[in-house]
Amino acid sequence: MHVWLLLFNFLLIGWSTTFAKTVVETLTSDDRFRVFVRQLNRTDLLQDLEHYPTATVFAPTDEAFNQKIQADMTRAELLYHILPQTVLTTEWHDGELFKTGYTQDGRSQKIKVTKNKDQWSLGNNVNIVDADLKADNGVVQVVNGLLTPPKNLVQTLTEHKELYTFSNLAKKAHIETELKRANGYTIFATQDVLDGLTDAEKDYLNHSEAKEELAQVLRHQISDSELYFGKIPRGKTQLKTLQGEKLELVLDKNNQVTVNGAKIVQSDILASNGVIHILEKSILPNNRDFLKMNLRKVLIGLNATKFVTLFEEYGLEDFLHTKDEYSIVAPPNDELNERNIPRSEIQSWLKYHIISKKYDLNNFTDGQLVKTESDDHLGGNGKQRLLIHIVDQDQTPINARKKSIQFDHANLIGNPVAVENSIIYPVSRSLELPRDPLSRLPLNLDLSTFTASLYSSGVADEIKNSQGITLFAPTNEAFARLGLLTKHLLQPNSQEKLARVIKFHAIKHGLYYLNETMQGEHRVPTLDGSEININKTEGGHMYVRGSGAGDGSDRSVIAKVIRPDMLVSNGVIHKIDRIQIPSTLEISNRDLLLAENTNSFINLILKTNLTEQILDSLDQPYTVLAPTDRAFAKLNVTHLLQNPDQLLRVAKLHVLPVALPKMSMQPGQDGDRLEKKSKGDGDNDNRGIHSDITTDGVEFSPLLDDEKIIITKVDGGYTIKTKSNSKHLADVVQIGRASNAGGVIQIDRVLLPYDQTEGKGSLPWWAVLLIVLGVLAGAALLGALGYYGWRWWKERQQGYINLDENH
């Protein structure tokens, strides 16, 4: 009996001894915690721990310390491994928070425990590998890693990958300092904080100038009341935010919590000065008047702050706050360079980016001119236009198509943004104001003659300085069509006439853009002082008619606009294919003859009484066939000059008392053909480009009554001959029209009457015929006499004698 009693006492003493260890003794007696114990002893925490009435210690093993090289742990870090209470894992529930021994800024720092299946974890993925080592004053939980105390809200947001967006926006909103200094904030964050806002609002809030508005959006997701998930009461709860509105929290019977309808998907992300909950979607303030978008804010959001700054700097800020309808072409900051713009033109240049109407993308058409707010140099109420280019681009998949739009040379680089009554088009570069005419014209090589004429006529500055003009610029080919007339106008002594012709092509104080010009006839004043007709046809073509086609149907002189709407600083230029001549401009045949090498012919005419009639008079049209000086060099002119009658006959042979026939020396613009009528054009557009001269030849009566002149169309030009001598051909070299509808046809050969051959006298045709007949009769008689003489001689040689019958 005594033996059993002694054995029982021994076991009882042993059992008492086993469970009489303190937490410190438990740690120091276990070889797994040598490094941890050394760290506790180094910071005097081992001694302090002996005085804890109760404690739970999360003790890292030596292996946990050896996993990475690090400096000694601080006292604060070690305290974060100690709870001033005893908690067994059998009493924990998932997501529970415990206060640790670490205190920062008077706040006891917490640690969160989570359970995955049968595995308990703490903080940053540290697992409990041996649970509930009991001591008489607490418990030791063996862990496989070191616990890291929470950092402040800003650091926690930065380091948590799902909170990166919120963290980044907090920096932009300049609320980081407030979050660092917080003492118990609760943040309801999402991965996409601004979800639910428009793209324009998002773009604006992401800009540095929107930091105040962004701060209000973020403050709506922050409360200065620290609220942990486990402390949310069941049912509905309201929580006031830093922005001023209240959030409604609802804890349902399934322990699901929503904040303003957004479910909490991750709770209790601990920070040293607060707590963060992640929501499934963003929560935005109900009252967003502070974020009400206007043109200025949208432009800032589109990275066009420099554009905004220039508008405000140059007194154009009203455009940014207007209620009127506009379309704004907005270049980004890095493509906006105002340094190349003269300061006096910056306002006009900026307003060139403002289209005076709200256009949706589908309202634009290729080649369209839209009116802008730029109005310098246009006079009155004129507004500068902007050219629109539209191109359909093939995309992937093949069936998809996308419109590519250009505002002049600036490409659309983003989706248009509608705001208030306007719409903004983000583009790749800033626009360029149209150049002045003298800078614009040289870029078109086929207008080089017209450009040179502007300067040689002395009207270049007048054209440049005129405000609100429409300029019709004839092509080089148009000048070439005038032939001798062009040569006359370009002579130095014709400067005044050339100036009148140039100014006749400039409409004074009138902007006639192709698509904006009303259909029908318009008679408008020019800088020349006279009027010119503009005709817009049903088919959309534009024609210009001066005095050369009074009936409006002679396409050989009526100009067609072949390239419209070349924008310049003071108006618009249209390229045309015919030159128009003012009705008051006097061009005589003498003027045309003096323009080319026809001095010999002029001298010939001066020797006759025809000078005033055919060279200078404008009462009746005459067409002069003028041989070149080279043609006269092949002729004995001295003989002609010595014979006044023959001289007059030659002169009259070269003068046709008719208007200059319709002829053209331009390839592809003459012959017996008519221009095809454009579909949809009115009657006024059925103007045939044709020639009076055909390939069969057309006969004319010169002043020389007994002769006829035949002009024939041939490949490459025309030939001229007299009817009496069809082999005596002259080629047409050049043509020129006088102002009375007469003109000059320059030829390469002198035409001669039937009684002359290259300057020598010749017999009439009947005399020539008699001579020929006489020669032929004489030849026949001589032949007969010769034949009979030969027969007589032959007979004598053979002894034949004709005997008289009487003998």
Image: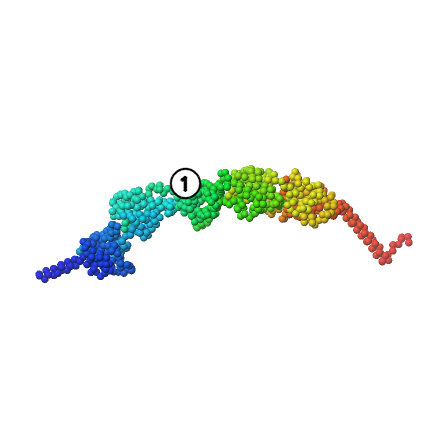
Corner quadrant of residue 692: top right
Q: In the displayed image of the protein, which residue is found farthest to the front?
A: 343
Look at the picture and state if 39 lies above or below 187: below
For the residue marked with disc 1, what is the amino acid?
His
The residue carrying pointer 1 sits among few (fewer than 14), some (14 to 19) or many (20 or more) residues within 10 Å by Cα, namely few
In the shown orientation, is residue 177 left or right of residue 714? left
Corner quadrant of residue 643: top right
Quadrant of the frame with the N terminus: bottom left
Q: Residue 631: x, y in percent?
A: 68, 48
Q: Residue 554: x, y in percent?
A: 60, 41
Query: Which color scheme does this rendered protein use?
Result: rainbow
Q: In the displayed image of the protein, which residue is found farthest to the bottom?
A: 3
Front-most of 427 and 685? 427
- Which residue is labeled 1 in the image? 321
Quadrant of the frame with the C terminus: bottom right
Residue 400 appearing in the image:
no
Residue 650 appearing in the image:
yes
Q: Residue 684: x, y in percent?
A: 57, 39
Look at the picture and state if 90 lies above or below 470: below
Q: Secondary structure at mark 1?
A: helix
In the shown orientation, is residue 783 left or right of residue 564? right
Q: What is the total number of numbered labels drawn onto the structure image?
A: 1
Front-most of 577 and 399? 577
Q: In the displayed image of the protein, which residue is found farthest to the left?
A: 1
Q: Residue 706: x, y in percent?
A: 72, 42
Question: Measuring 53% from the left and 46% from the top, which residue is drawn there?
Answer: 439
Question: Measuring 25% from the left and 47% from the top, which residue is drawn there?
Answer: 231
